[in-house]
């Protein structure tokens, strides 16, 4: 009889255990990451905030390292239109793409940032352009943008010119499997993976979407799409699928915001299906992911979810500039802290915290040009960007010790 009870308890624990972990861990983070308890960390060699008077509310950024240019997805209209956070006040103030010729060698060179010219896009669609996640295939200069238009979610495909200063619209993609597209990663010149953060859209099914979020229901998904054949199918389901990145061409990393974790998948290069091999719990609510040329996974997100929610509901009330000069004083605006970390990609790899703080808030994406030692952090409801330099770090390679990141050494064999 005791063996029977033990077997029952084991089965129940196997079923309920993952659910409890996914819910107790975020609850614990709500306590230890409270802004009053949160430590301030900066492992950057140097950093500064730039362009605060020019851009704001940037969700994503990708690098064209060959040309030393960053492409940013920014939307000042996010204050009144955010289909993920459930803000539906006014969709008429559209977003834009920007390019930044970041300093080539000296961190303190100013560089310049400019709005990218968009041509070939239907005027009505352009006026309702609300860019979120972006993916870039540099070899053919193709840019993919998740667009949360009030007309319905789409993926917009652009061709970037050689100077990375303007884009030409090539096609609009909509599909039944792309109901809440969030992040995009290309794996070839015609293949992409896309995350859907929810099964239910907040706009159409607010109660179900809210339950999906707070119960960590695996309604989010990863979808594979072949743009040559139009073959499209779901390859994974997980709670609040968010950022996505490819490591070494064969490994897919996907953020699960509400668990909070990064899920690691092996890619079947023939079928494009994926198999989860690892789950990395992180001490904050993960947003977007990127991989630098050393194969290091950069992870950005939010230490305390209630702070982000408060900012998303109140940001439109303040004097933010650029068409919003009226409102409450900026010094009264609530802030939500940021968290940026990195993971070296190994099975027992170390999660290293790079930045935790409120000076630059609501971090969503971090990227790094290893050769130039220039990194960028963008914030969902923040003004400007954070530009940073990484500290040199010792890392093993083939049994040797070498400086990392340096642009000359890799932490992978």
Image: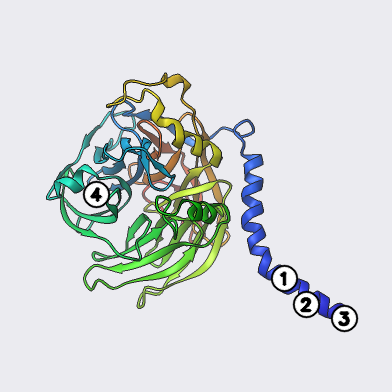
Tell me which numbered mark, 3 or 2, is placed earlier along the sequence.
Answer: 3
Pick whichever of labels 2 and 1 is earlier in the sequence.
2
Q: Tag 2, which secondary structure?
A: helix
Determine the image quadrant of residue 205: bottom left
* Mark-to-mark CA distance, 3 and 1: 17 Å
Please give the name of the residue rendered at 54% of the width and 42% of the height, measured from the top-left corner.
305
Q: Looking at the image, which is closer to me, 51 or 219?
A: 219
Return the mark for residue 66: 4
Mark 3 sits on what residue?
A: 1
Label annotation for residue 7 = 2
Query: Secondary structure under badge 4?
Result: loop
Residue at the (16%, 52%) spot, across then down:
169
Q: Looking at the rendered structure, which numbered label has been put on residue 12?
A: 1
Q: Where is residue 65 in the image (x, y as percent from the top left)?
A: 28, 48
**Number of other residues with Cα within 10 Å of mark 4, as a class: few under 14, some 14 to 19, many 20 or more:** few
Q: How far apart are marks 4 and 1 (CA)?
A: 54 Å
C-beta proximity under 8 Å, tags 4 and 1: no
Does label 4 or label 3 sit earlier along the sequence? Answer: 3
CA gap, disc 2 and disc 4: 59 Å
> Against 279, is 381 above or below?
above
144 on left or right of 82: left
């Amino acid at each position: 009889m005791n063996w029977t009870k033990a077997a029952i308890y084991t089965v129940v624990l196997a079923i309920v255990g993952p659910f409890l972990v996914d819910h107790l861990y975020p609850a614990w983070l709500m306590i230890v990451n409270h802004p009053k308890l949160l430590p301030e960390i900066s492992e950057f060699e140097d950093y500064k905030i730039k362009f605060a008077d020019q851009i704001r509310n940037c969700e994503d950024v990708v690098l064209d390292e060959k040309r030393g240019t960053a492409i940013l997805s920014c939307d000042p209209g996010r204050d009144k239109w955010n289909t993920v956070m459930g803000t539906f006040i006014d969709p008429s103030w559209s977003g834009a793409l920007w390019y930044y010729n970041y300093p080539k060698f000296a961190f303190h060179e100013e560089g310049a940032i400019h709005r990218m010219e968009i041509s070939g896009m239907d005027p009505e669609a352009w006026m309702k352009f609300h860019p979120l996640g972006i993916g870039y295939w540099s070899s053919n200069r193709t840019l993919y943008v998740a667009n949360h238009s009030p007309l319905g979610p789409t993926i917009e495909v652009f061709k970037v010119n050689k100077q990375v200063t303007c884009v030409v619209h090539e096609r609009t993609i909509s599909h039944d499997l792309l109901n809440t597209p969030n992040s995009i990663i290309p794996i070839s010149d015609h293949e992409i993976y896309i995350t859907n953060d929810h099964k239910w859209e907040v706009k159409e099914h607010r109660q179900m979407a809210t339950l999906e979020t707070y119960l960590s229901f695996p309604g989010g998904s990863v979808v594979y799409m072949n743009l040559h054949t139009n073959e499209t199918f779901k390859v994974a389901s997980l709670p609040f699928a968010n950022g996505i990145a490819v490591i070494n061409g064969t490994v897919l990393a996907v953020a699960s915001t509400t668990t909070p974790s990064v899920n690691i998948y092996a890619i079947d290069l023939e079928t494009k299906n994926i198999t989860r091999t690892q789950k990395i719990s992180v001490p904050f609510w993960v947003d977007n992911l990127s991989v630098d040329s050393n194969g290091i996974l950069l992870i950005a997100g939010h230490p305390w979810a209630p702070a982000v929610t408060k900012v998303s509901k109140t940001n439109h009330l303040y004097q933010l500039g650029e068409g919003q000069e009226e409102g409450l004083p900026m010094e009264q605006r609530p802030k939500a802290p940021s968290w940026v970390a990195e993971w070296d990609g190994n099975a027992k790899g170390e999660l290293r915290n790079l930045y935790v703080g409120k000076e630059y808030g609501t971090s969503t994406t971090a990227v790094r040009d290893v050769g130039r030692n220039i990194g960028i952090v963008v914030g969902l409801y923040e003004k400007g960007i954070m530009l940073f330099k990484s500290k040199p770090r010792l890392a093993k390679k083939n049994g040797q010790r070498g400086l990392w990141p340096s642009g000359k050494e890799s932490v992978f064999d």
